[in-house]
């Protein structure tokens, strides 16, 4: 997996399968998922990454541990 961050655009890119051939992309909220023809994820683009990661960290810090 490769991880890149574009400061100017505030986009975090997670390349899950560098060998995968992108067929199309699906936009879900602040995430764009690039997938192969068979639907396997190849690349995730997290838009407004700073805000997204802040929410993830806050949620992780406030979640209760399983009993």
Image (tube, helix red, strand yellow):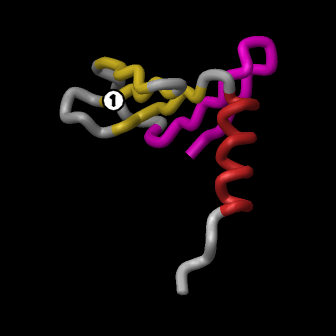
Residue extending furthest bottom? 67
Residue extending furthest top? 8
Magenta residues (range): 1-17
Whole-percent x, y for residue 39 in the image: 24, 35
Q: For residue 2, what is the image quadrant?
A: top right
Residue found 63% across the figure and 64% down from its top: 63
> Nearest the camera: 66 or 26?
66
Residue found 72% across the figure and 31% down from its top: 51
Q: Is residue 55 magenta?
A: no
Q: Reply above or below: 5 against 8.
A: below
Q: Is residue 3 magenta?
A: yes
Residue extending furthest left? 38
Q: Reply above or below: 43 against 2.
A: above
What residue does disc 1 label?
35
Residue found 54% across the figure and 80% down from its top: 66
How many marks do you count on the picture? 1
> Nearest the camera: 60 or 7?
60
Residue found 36% across the figure and 20% down from its top: 25
What element does badge 1 sit on? Answer: strand
> Nearest the camera: 37 or 52?
52
Q: Reply above or below: 56 against 42.
A: below
Q: Quadrant of the C terminus?
A: bottom right
Whole-percent x, y for residue 10 in the image: 73, 20
Left or right of residue 24, residue 7 in this image: right
Task: Assess disc 1: are there few (<14), some (14-19) or many (≥20) residues with their C-alpha within 10 Å of its C-alpha.
Answer: many
Left or right of residue 32, residue 39 in this image: left
Whole-percent x, y for residue 15 in the image: 53, 36
Q: Reply above or below: 13 against 9.
A: below
């Amino acid at each position: 997996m490769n991880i890149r961050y574009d400061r100017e655009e505030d986009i975090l890119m997670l390349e899950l399968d560098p060998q995968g051939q992108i067929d199309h992309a699906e936009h879900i909220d602040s995430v764009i998922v690039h997938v192969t023809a068979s639907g396997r994820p190849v690349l995730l683009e997290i838009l407004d990454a700073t805000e997204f990661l802040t929410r993830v960290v806050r949620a992780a810090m406030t979640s209760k541990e399983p009993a």
